Amino acid sequence: MTISSARASFRVLMSVSLLALAGGHLGCAQGEFRLGDPFDRQLSLSESQHRYTVFMRWSQFQKAKAFVAKDEQEDFLLQTKALKDARFTDYESDPVELDEEKEMATIRVTYTVYTPSLPYEVEVNEIQEWTRNGVGNNWSVHSNFEGLNKLAAN
């Protein structure tokens, strides 16, 4: 190999490397690739949590149940019976608290609801503990509601 062909090869290699770095950086900005989470588990958690919470917001509890841990689905449906007449007007999710050691994420969601028999809005809190089996993206929620007694009392 001559010196000029070695230089040309080096320039091509550097150009490809720079393009790869620039492409990786752009991908990061668009959420397509993150060095700290190459399997996009956080993005999958965000999507799962958002879909579940939207199902809850629109009182689609049977659809939300698909995200609930299998052994807790019956209890989940019993808890959501208190919400069957509820009208959700808003919800707000707190930031995700990640516990990498336990491979768990906790999110507190506050729903604002009223019922036809309750002429004012009340807040119902849900503590969502998200876990997954192995390294896959199949997240499931363990749900705990606070404030359902406000709706049941009326």
Image (spheres, helix red, strand yellow):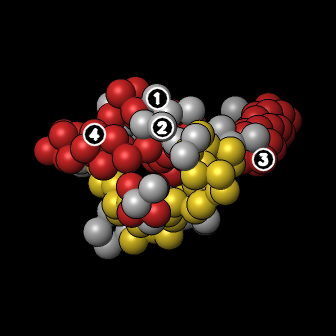
Left-right relation of 46 to 102: right
Q: Where on the picture, by quarter, is residue 131?
A: bottom left
Residue 133 x %, y %:
24, 47
Left-right relation of 94 to 74: right
Looking at this view, is 57 or 150 the one in front?
150
At label 4, the amino acid type is Leu
Looking at this view, is 60 or 51 the one in front?
60
**Is 149 situated above or below 84?**
below
First of labels 2, 4 by sequence position: 4
Residue highlighted by disc 3: 29
Residue highlighted by disc 4: 77
Residue 36's mark? none
Give the SS element for disc 1.
loop
Q: Residues within 10 Å of mark 2 (few under 14, many from 20)?
A: some
Which residue is located at x 14 percent, y 44 percent? 71
Residue highlighted by disc 2: 85
Evaluate whether residue 17 shows in this view.
Answer: no
